Image (cartoon, helix red, strand yellow):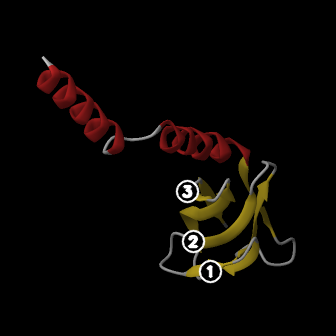
Amino acid sequence: MKKIVTFLILALLFFTSNSCSKHDDEVIVDCLAESIFVKLHNSTDASNPKLMNYSVGYSGTGTLVSVKWTFGDGSTGTGQEVTHTYAAAGTYEAKAEVTVKKDGADCTSIPKRTVTVN
């Protein structure tokens, strides 16, 4: 009987130490929640309809670490606020890879915006 109890205790310790901790689950939930606080903004320049002004707003409790942009025409950029001039009129999908640091974890979300350039 003593061997069975010892075996069960060792098995319990093994599975507990090799499973996801509650902290890991909380970090995942926090990262998903932080993506709600990320907003993309865009506006066209009044003097140049092919020039688009982009920015990312973040209102969460973490720290905005980086923003990497893809503009839908093969071009990229970095920064919380960027401008991009499109070579031709059309409809493009702009994406911002936004990384936020929260409670020691990096949380990345990729919001998208479809823009029409005249």
- Measuring 21% from the left and 33% from the top, which residue is drawn there? 11
Q: Secondary structure at mark 3?
A: loop
Amino acid type of the residue that numbered disc 2 sits on in the rendered structure: Phe
Q: Which circle, 1 or 2, is nearer the viewer?
A: 1
| Label 1, label 2: how far apart the Cα atoms are | 8 Å
Q: Secondary structure at mark 1?
A: strand
Quadrant for the C terminus, please. bottom right
Q: Which mark is residue 35?
A: none
Along the line of sight, which residue is nearer the eye, 20 or 113? 20
Label 3 crowd bin: few (<14), some (14–19), many (20+), radius 10 Å: some
Q: Label 2 belongs to which residue?
A: 71
Amino acid type of the residue that numbered disc 3 sits on in the rendered structure: Ile
| Label 3, label 2: how far apart the Cα atoms are | 13 Å
- Measuring 49% from the left and 44% from the top, which residue is drawn there? 24
Along the line of sight, which residue is nearer the eye, 100 or 109? 100
Quadrant for the N terminus, please. top left
Q: Is residue 67 above or below residue 108?
A: below
Amino acid type of the residue that numbered disc 1 sits on in the rendered structure: Gly
Q: Label 1 belongs to which residue?
A: 77
Residue 86 makes an appearance in the image? no
**In which quadrant of the rendered view does residue 27 lie?**
top right
Location of residue 2 in the rendering, given as x and y in whole percent from the top left corner: 16, 22
Q: Label 3 belongs to which residue?
A: 110
Q: Is residue 83 above or below residue 31?
A: below
Location of residue 79 in the rendering, given as x and y in whole percent from the top left corner: 71, 76
Along the line of sight, which residue is nearer the eye, 38 or 9? 9
Judged left or right of residue 63, residue 36 is: left
The numbered mark, 3 or 2, whose residue comes first in the sequence reads 2
